[in-house]
């Protein structure tokens, strides 16, 4: 199982020097990919810009938006952005897409929250048409550049429930499933549902399975992880966010190792770990565990 690492894009003290250091550490470490999530509201770095910088700064790791909240975007713009990222990285992009759950982000950019699942299905189809050279409108030139990867980057659907799995099975190359606390049983339920959906759809190969969870190995890791989770989930209500934050367990090396090995045993292709802080110790101490 490959191990990827997400950039800590929510950190306030995370500027040029820190981004450079993280990109170098991830690319030189035992990691398979470098990812970044997308949020609009709150103090967060913009995903596409961060990943463009990472594509130029790295040579080896895959570059993964995780996730493009696709219904917030024009499919045509997104196709052009992702193809350009694939060119910048030399064909190293794996594209994660999802519908997100933050209506406030949609409203902040003037996008509709309605019918977002269908709009994502339609957007993926449009992106693939554009990558194949079909003009966005009749009589127009094609929209370049063409991705380095023929047909475009692999598309991974960020999904959780059986209904979303079935939709993704019609067009995705795989799934990205997430357990906040690194709960192996939660991951197992989701990857089992993905396999069933792919089988029901008559796909000729099983889905790529990418899992993820939050962790911290920074100084005061338990506090940092709880504060991070509370901040991330506060938009859904302070009481719920605090309750979930108290359940976080991957702030000790032993718990992280246990979750990694449990997810490995499920046959996942990759695990992307999301750190709770911008301290470089999050990378260095994780390398020690993986070693």
Image (spheres, rainbow, N blue to C red):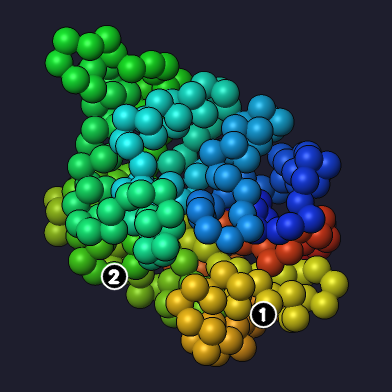
The answer to whether residue 158 is left or right of residue 201 is right
Q: Where is residue 64 in the image (x, y as percent from the top left)?
A: 52, 43
**Measured Cα–Cα span from mark 2 to mark 1:** 25 Å
- For residue 171, which quarter of the picture? top left
The residue where tag 2 is placed is 161
The residue where tag 1 is placed is 226
The answer to whether residue 75 is left or right of residue 42 is left
Mark 1, other Cα within 10 Å: few <14 / some 14–19 / many ≥20: many
Is 39 in front, or is 217?
39
Q: Position of residue 273 (x, y in %)?
A: 61, 61
Q: What element carries label 1?
A: helix
Marked residue nearer the N-terminal end (2 or 1): 2
- For residue 154, which quarter of the picture? top left
Quarter of the image with the C terminus is bottom right
Is 147 in front, or is 37?
37
Residue at x 60%, y 69% (from the top left corner): 214
Residue 102 disc label: none
Q: Position of residue 5 (x, y in %)?
A: 63, 53
Q: Looking at the picture, does residue 210 appear above or below residue 28?
A: below
Q: Where is residue 89 in the image (x, y as percent from the top left)?
A: 58, 27
Q: What element carries label 2?
A: loop
Is 206 in front, or is 107?
107
Residue at x 85%, y 72% (from the top left corner): 219
Mark 2, other Cα within 10 Å: few <14 / some 14–19 / many ≥20: few
Quarter of the image with the N terminus is bottom right
Residue at x 19%, y 20% (from the top left corner): 137
Q: Is residue 81 among what the camera can see?
A: yes
Q: Is residue 291 among what the camera can see?
A: no
Q: Looking at the picture, does residue 88 appear above or below residue 37?
A: above
Residue at x 31%, y 36% (from the top left corner): 75
The answer to whether residue 175 is left or right of residue 19 is left
Query: Of tags 2 and 1, which is closer to the observer?
Result: 1
């Amino acid at each position: 199982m490959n191990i990827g690492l997400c950039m800590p894009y929510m950190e306030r003290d995370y500027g040029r020097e820190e981004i450079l250091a993280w990109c170098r550490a991830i690319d030189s470490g035992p990691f398979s990919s470098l990812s970044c999530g997308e949020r609009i509201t709150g103090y967060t770095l913009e995903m596409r810009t961060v990943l463009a910088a990472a594509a130029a700064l790295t040579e080896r790791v895959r570059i993964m938006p995780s996730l493009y909240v696709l219904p917030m975007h024009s499919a045509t713009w997104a196709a052009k952005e992702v193809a350009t990222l694939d060119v910048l990285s030399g064909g190293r992009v794996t594209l994660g897409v999802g519908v997100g759950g933050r209506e406030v982000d949609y409203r902040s950019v003037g996008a509709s929250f309605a019918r977002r699942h269908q709009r994502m299905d339609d957007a993926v189809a449009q992106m693939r048409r554009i990558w194949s050279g079909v003009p966005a409108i009749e009589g127009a030139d094609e929209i370049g550049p063409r991705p380095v990867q023929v047909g475009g980057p692999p598309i991974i659907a960020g999904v959780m429930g059986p209904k979303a799995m079935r939709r993704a099975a019609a067009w995705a190359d795989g799934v990205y499933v997430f357990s906040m606390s690194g709960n192996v049983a939660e991951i197992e339920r989701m990857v089992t549902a993905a396999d069933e959906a792919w089988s029901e759809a008559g796909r000729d190969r099983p889905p790529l399975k990418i899992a993820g969870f939050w962790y911290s190995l920074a100084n005061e890791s338990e506090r940092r992880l709880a504060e991070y989770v509370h901040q991330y989930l506060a938009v859904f209500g302070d009481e719920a966010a605090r309750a979930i934050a108290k359940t976080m367990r991957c702030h000790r090396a032993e718990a992280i190792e246990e979750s990694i090995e449990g997810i490995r045993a499920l046959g996942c292709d990759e695990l992307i770990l999301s750190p709770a802080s911008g301290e470089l110790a999050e990378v260095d101490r994780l390398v020690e565990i993986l070693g």
